[in-house]
Image: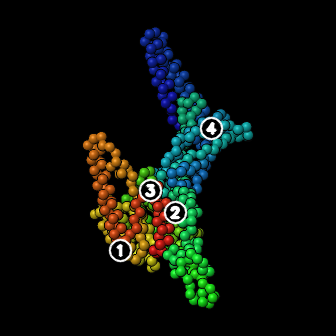
Amino acid sequence: MRPTPRCVLLFAAGVPLAVVPALLFPAGRLAWPVLLAATAAACVLDAARTLPARRMRVAARMPGRVVVGTPGPVALALSVERLVRPLEVEVLLDVDALLEAPAPVHARCEPSDVAGGGARAELELPVRPLRRGTGHVRRAHLRWTGPLGLFAVTRVETLDGEVPCIADLPAVRALALRFFGTRHGSTGLKTERYRGEGSEFESLQRWAPGFDPRAIDWRASARARRLLVRNFRAERDHQVVLAVDAGRLMSEPLGDVPRVDHAINAALQLAYVALRTGDRVGLYAFDAEPRAWIAPRSTMPSFTRLEQAAARIDYANVETNFTRAMLDLEHRLRKRSLVVVFTEFVDPVTAELMLTHVGRLARRHVVVFVALRDASLEDVTRREPLGMLDVNRAVVAGDLLAERHTVLQRLRRAGVAVLDALPGEAGAELLNRYLDIKRRERV
């Protein structure tokens, strides 16, 4: 229990009220002890009627999985024993750096008519995840004052609650379903009739004018004594591996979200579509060393395993070791695969090892290199300079963009399919690139 600013102000205001009469009138010297006694009596009365901290109980219920950037409610239930007057309680949550702390919330407890005079109040405090991982709600701080507002009681309740913070999976599924609902998204499921659209035999059909003569099956036609053509479809059961870099550069924010979270969203969108089209999808995460490996599987229930593995990819503050990561991934891949690499680089010098090993991986597999473009650099180069500082910034930004272009061109010459897109467009462009690779039968 502590005095409030009102209590301090009350004592401070009593000083001039007591000194002035004492200076003007000899009998005014009695004003000081009288005023002091009245103020002390008010404080004692307020302290006696203030609810003790031991009569307050707090129960907390943490939210389930909360999407990054979307608030999730932490429910608190306050119960008070023997409450005789309405009580206004201010509640503040103490959270870790993974969560954005909510603003203080006020709850009002009303005395009940039942025996014992207990009261109960329920409230929700929204916590917003800033990044993926497991956020912790450590403590709840409760504060209330007495009837005169001269003393305040503070109670700290230890909660130790965990809030799982995951990527924006509803948006992932929504975009994936939009693509899957188009005619392009059904590649690998529907029959493709013309040679060049697929390589896997699907069925025979009677020849009709307009069909490609090269698709005629002469042996089957001889047995049936009529012209039959082969129907082909795009091959299924491709192996797709999503390789996500979680090193220092990928942990830096792009906009308000770390690069690795943008990469995971795009990777999960591709995984959803690829599983729906019958391909096998795996996940590989790395930074200074390999961190996670989910072997490729082809069933839709395996998407849950990919979600859980992606949620456990942590933010690293170490440099990425491309030599170790790419050699380890190449050793794991026994079959020709479509490898989608999500990573970031600074300049051609630091990207040299990455270029070497990604190019080596592309000799055996189909590699799609996904780099997230920073729109702020392009804005700096296009903005009209207002002074020498703006000119310097534009020159530096232009050099960074030129070096980035050089690295991406070297990747293209090494046979790597490069996708350089803004974070909000990366998922859609990656799905288009994947469907185009399937139609061309490149895997």
Which one is in front in this view, the residue at disc 4 or the one at disc 2?
2
**Residue designated by label 4:** 108
**The residue under label 4 is which amino acid type?**
Arg
Nearest to the observer: residue 22 or residue 307: 307
**The residue under label 3 is which amino acid type?**
Pro
Nearest to the observer: residue 432 or residue 352: 432
Q: Residue 360 got which mark? A: 1
**Residue designated by label 3:** 423
Whether the residues at callouts 4 and 1 have beta carbons within 8 Å, the answer is no
**Residue designated by label 2:** 269
**The residue under label 1 is which amino acid type?**
Arg
Q: Earlier in the sequence, mark 2 or mark 1?
A: 2
Q: Earlier in the sequence, mark 3 or mark 4?
A: 4
Q: Earlier in the sequence, mark 2 or mark 3?
A: 2
As displayed, is residue 390 above or below residue 37? below
Q: Earlier in the sequence, mark 3 or mark 1?
A: 1
Q: Would you say residue 283 is visible in this rendering?
A: no
> Alpha-carbon distance for marks 4 and 1?
66 Å
> Alpha-carbon distance for marks 3 and 1?
27 Å
Packing grade of label 3 (10 A; few <14, some 14-19, many >=20) is many
> Alpha-carbon distance for marks 2 and 1?
27 Å
Nearest to the observer: residue 207 or residue 409: 207
Q: Earlier in the sequence, mark 4 or mark 1?
A: 4
